[in-house]
Amino acid sequence: MEYQGIIIAVSVVAGCGLLISILLSIFAKRFAVAVDEKEEAVLAALPGNNCGGCGFPGCSGLAAAIAKGEAPVGGCPVGGAEVAEKIAAIMGVDAGEFVKRVAFVKCRGTCEVAGSNYDYTGPKDCKSAVMAPGRGSKKCDHGCLGFGSCAKVCDRDAIHILDGVAVIDPEKCGACGQCVNACPMGLIELVPYEANVRVVCSSKDRGPVTMKACSVGCIGCGICAKTCEFGAITVTDNVAHIDYDKCTRCGACAEKCPKKIITV
């Protein structure tokens, strides 16, 4: 009798297992999601950093967009031209010209040239310092706080804090964009690697106010815009901006800038 009970119990468990496996198989076939082979191939070609520098939620998001034709084959800034060529071959299209980009800090308000309102003694983190009175201790409300939140998220050791300002090594930068997201002041942007003409200021204050806060800040005079023959420079919110699609990198604007905040 004891053996009979054991056999019955085993039979019931085995029967339940068989029934569940059949049901799972039916549901798997009925609700199966079609796999896009190109999407899978594109995902395999991507570096897998999942940094978000492409503007999509990770590599899988970019792969899906490329497969649907909603993103360019060269959409991965980390992979560069090599990955773009691989993906282009998968998609059966021309890779086109890949524009290498690097991160750039729009500030040079070092401790020597930027004034200070008080000694900040809080957590040594930009996101914490920006919550302090005046958005940090520096007189400029738009400058680099210098506590390295950007450097902490860079996995390439491309960012270092020098004399109170973040400085990026373009040769190490992978243009992943993590530092862009980490900066609470919005001072970092991705620019073309070849773009050697850059505005190193983000102050939106009027000239007199800027000069009291930082001796090398943009005063919004507009001389650069008047000098540029190609319409590549505009002054918005009292600070110069460069349109790199129009800029010929002639350097004329840098020569005429009275504050030398346009560098070459």
Image (tube, rainbow, N blue to C red):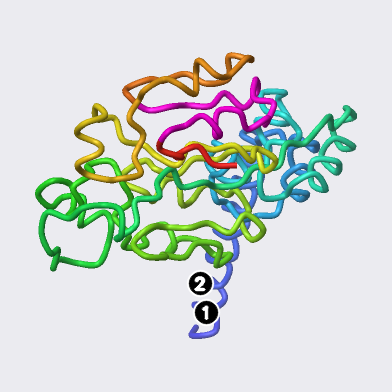
Q: Which residue shows up at 34% across the image and 62% down it?
A: 164
Pointers 2 and 1 in contact (CB under 8 A)? Answer: yes
Question: Is 197 left, or right, of 115 in this rendering?
Answer: right
Classify residue 186 by image quadrant: top left
Percent across and percent down for residue 157 are: 55, 67
At horizontal 75% and vertical 34% (from top left) the residue drawn is 36
Circle 2 residues within 10 Å: few <14, some 14–19, many ≥20: few
The quarter holding residue 129 reads: bottom left
What residue does disc 1 label? 6
Is residue 239 left or right of 45 when viewed as pictured? left
Where is 78 relative to 239, above or below?
A: below
Of the residues shown, which amino acid type is indicated by label 1? Ile
Identify the disc placed on residue 9. 2
Magenta highlight range: 239-258
Assess whether residue 169 is covered by the magenta stretch: no
- Residue 94 location in percent, x, y? 88, 28
User: Residue 228 in the image: x percent, y percent?
Assistant: 58, 19
